[in-house]
Amino acid sequence: MDRFADLEAFTAVVESGTFSAAGERLGIAKSVVSRRISQLESRLGGRLMNRTTRRLALTDAGKNFYPRATQILADLDDAEQSVMQETAELRGSLKLAAPLSFGLLHLSSAINDFLNEHPSIELNLDLNDRNINLVEDGFDMAVRIGELKDSTLVARRLGTAQYVTCASPAYLQQFGEPVQPDDLRQHVGLQYSNVTYKQQWCYVTPEGKTIFGQPQIRIRSNNGDALAAAAMAGLGITAGPTFILGSHIKEKKLVALLKEYQRPAT
């Protein structure tokens, strides 16, 4: 039994003048309106309106009850609206983790727009390439690049990262250019330490076979920009995402290598 639905039916009948009009207003059958009025009168222990085939007339009890019923419904509507507005307006603290380079290059403007749109949000942003445990470290969410391991966490793909292998023109002039992944054995590699050796130097041949390069690692770093800087300084070959290396290749500070061999995207 829905007490508010009964009140709604009563006020609709009073304001519409007939059970049929009240039913049309509420989107329910005339018989449902009649049943709700009967339920309300039974619960109150008295008649609220006198019905004839031609007209409806409020009893004294009905006249006294009507303004209170409309006020109750108005208060309920106001309460629901206030909760809906509070829910629609995001508020509270949000702890977000994201990779340093990707965060600086691609997230900053989006985060700023989000905070301008939701002024009641307090953000704790951790830009770091380290591996973290979201639950143990108290993070609400994280942006991560790579394949998600088996987990109970809810993940949503935001985009696809493309990868490229590259070195500086000076390095290639001194040591030559690798033609196939196996040639990397004769070269110096710059390793991103947050992925495995095989993950960074993984290639797919035109025939679809997966193979691995094995450069001699000279520098290990947990930051892709640091490795890009080392590559531009001629210290070795690096392999990483185009959102870090792409602009340097476009500016000809780095040269893309092994272009016939695809890197698995994530």
Image: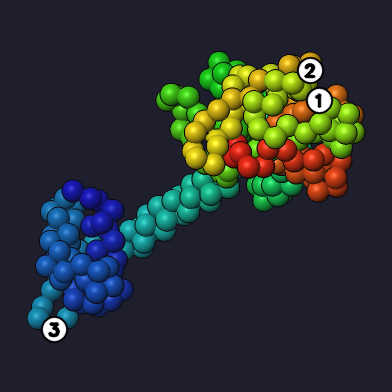
Name which of mark 1 and mark 2 comes first in the sequence: 2
- Give the secondary structure at mark 2: strand
> Counting other residues with Cα less than 10 Å from the Cα at mark 1, is it few (<14), some (14-19), or many (20 or more)?
many
Amino acid at dot 1: Gly
Please give the name of the residue rendered at 48% of the width and 50% of the height, measured from the top-left corner.
Answer: 84
> Counting other residues with Cα less than 10 Å from the Cα at mark 2, is it few (<14), some (14-19), or many (20 or more)?
some
Please give the name of the residue rendered at 17% of the width and 62% of the height, measured from the top-left corner.
Answer: 37
Name which of mark 2 and mark 3 comes first in the sequence: 3
**Which of 140/83 is in front?**
140
How many numbered circles does the render carry? 3
**Which of 40/93 is in front?**
93
* Mark closer to the observer (3, 1): 1
**Which of 189/123 is in front?**
189
Residue 142: image location, x then y, percent: 59, 31
The alpha-carbon separation of the residues under discs 1 and 2 comes to 9 Å
- Give the secondary structure at mark 3: loop
**What is the quadrant of residue 204 in the picture?**
top right
Name which of mark 3 and mark 1 comes first in the sequence: 3
The alpha-carbon separation of the residues under discs 2 and 3 comes to 93 Å
Please give the name of the residue rendered at 37% of the width and 57% of the height, measured from the top-left corner.
Answer: 73
Q: Kindly tell me whether residue 97 is visible in this rendering.
A: no
Amino acid at dot 3: Arg
- List the residue tagged with mark 3: 54
- List the residue tagged with mark 2: 219
Q: Kindly tell me whether residue 85 is visible in this rendering.
A: yes
- Dots 1, 2 in contact, CB < 8 A: yes
- Give the secondary structure at mark 1: loop
Amino acid at dot 2: Ile
- List the residue tagged with mark 1: 236
**Which of 11/154 is in front?**
154
Residue 40: image location, x then y, percent: 18, 56
